[in-house]
Image: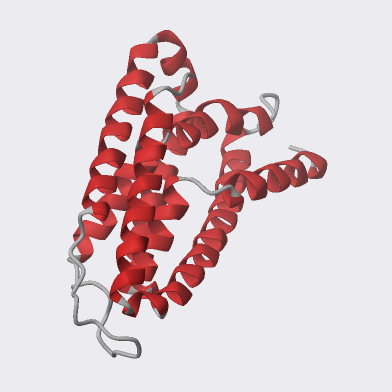
């Protein structure tokens, strides 16, 4: 891999990671509801799934999806169903009517760490953009005539740094929103807006094609 190829990968990954998608929305929503520390668990779940898919990519995920398109369809539809579930859950989240601006309480009840991690993992693992990134995009930057493991390690580390950096950008943005979510009417609008976007992503995923 040449330095020019690496810089091209950096540029493309920067743009792809910055683009709002289910992963980023989930991180931002988790931060707005529960704080940046809790959102780190969502980030960890997302990154676990992404790194696992990229590792499998090195073993031929692209060839598997090409040979068995039903595998891609199953992952896509299961992801769509899960996003729809998150959307409905967010839309119907209870809002305390007595919540007042400036209150020191959090905008939502505490949630178990494992739930946040699992949500991040499942959303990232079933995201068609992430699947295609690992299966079709990443291998194009590896020179088959050179040792592939060092190249793969460099790309993996580069991707992880950029992706996590964008996660924190979205998490900080979500944390800033939490100030406004102390108001019951604003929290209600936020719940329905994020729920609607999750359902929108679910519809998009349901009709996505490889």
Residue lying farthest to the right in this orientation: 4
Q: Number of callouts in the render? A: 0
**Nearest the camera: 113 or 200?**
200
Evaluate whether residue 204 shows in this view.
yes
Q: From what the image shows, is residue 20 above or below residue 139?
A: below
Q: Which residue is depicted at the point 69% across and 29% down?
A: 143
Q: Position of residue 85 (x, y in %)?
A: 23, 42
Is 145 drawn above or below residue 55 in the view shown? above
Q: Which residue is drawn at 49% across and 45% down?
A: 21
| Residue 60 seen in the current view | no
Above or below — where is 199 with respect to 103? Answer: above
The answer to which of 31 and 7 lies nearer the viewer is 31
Q: Is residue 156 left or right of residue 178?
A: right
Q: Which one is in front, 115 or 196?
A: 196
Q: How is the image coloured?
A: secondary structure
> Is residue 12 rendered to the left or right of residue 28?
right
**x, y percent for residue 147:** 64, 33
In percent of width and height, residue 150 lies at 60, 42
Q: Quarter of the image containing the N terminus?
A: top right
User: Residue 151: where, in percent of width, then height?
Assistant: 63, 40
> What residue is rendered at 40% in x and 38% in y?
200
Within the image, what quadrant is residue 162 found in?
Answer: bottom right
Q: Which residue is drawn at 49% across and 21% down?
A: 62
From the viewer's side, name the closer residue of 75 and 82: 82
């Amino acid at each position: 891999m040449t330095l020019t190829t690496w810089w091209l990968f950096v540029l493309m990954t920067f743009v792809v990671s910055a683009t709002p998608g289910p992963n980023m929305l989930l991180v931002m929503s988790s931060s707005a509801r529960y704080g940046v520390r809790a959102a780190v668990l969502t980030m960890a779940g997302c990154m676990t799934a992404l790194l696992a898919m990229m590792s499998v990519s090195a073993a031929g995920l692209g060839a598997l999806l090409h040979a068995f398109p039903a595998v891609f369809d199953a992952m896509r539809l299961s992801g769509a169903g899960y996003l729809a579930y998150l959307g409905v859950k967010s839309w119907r989240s209870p809002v305390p009517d007595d919540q007042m601006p400036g209150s020191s309480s959090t905008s939502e009840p505490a949630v178990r760490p494992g739930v946040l991690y699992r949500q991040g993992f499942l959303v990232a693992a079933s995201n068609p953009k992430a699947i295609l990134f690992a299966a079709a995009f990443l291998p194009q930057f590896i020179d088959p005539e050179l040792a592939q493991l060092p190249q793969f390690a460099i790309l993996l580390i580069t991707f992880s740094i950029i992706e996590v950096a964008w996660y924190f950008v979205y998490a900080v943005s979500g944390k800033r929103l939490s100030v406004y979510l102390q108001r019951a009417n604003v929290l209600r609008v936020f719940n329905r807006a994020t729920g609607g976007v999750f359902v929108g992503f679910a519809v998009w995923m349901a009709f996505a094609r490889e």
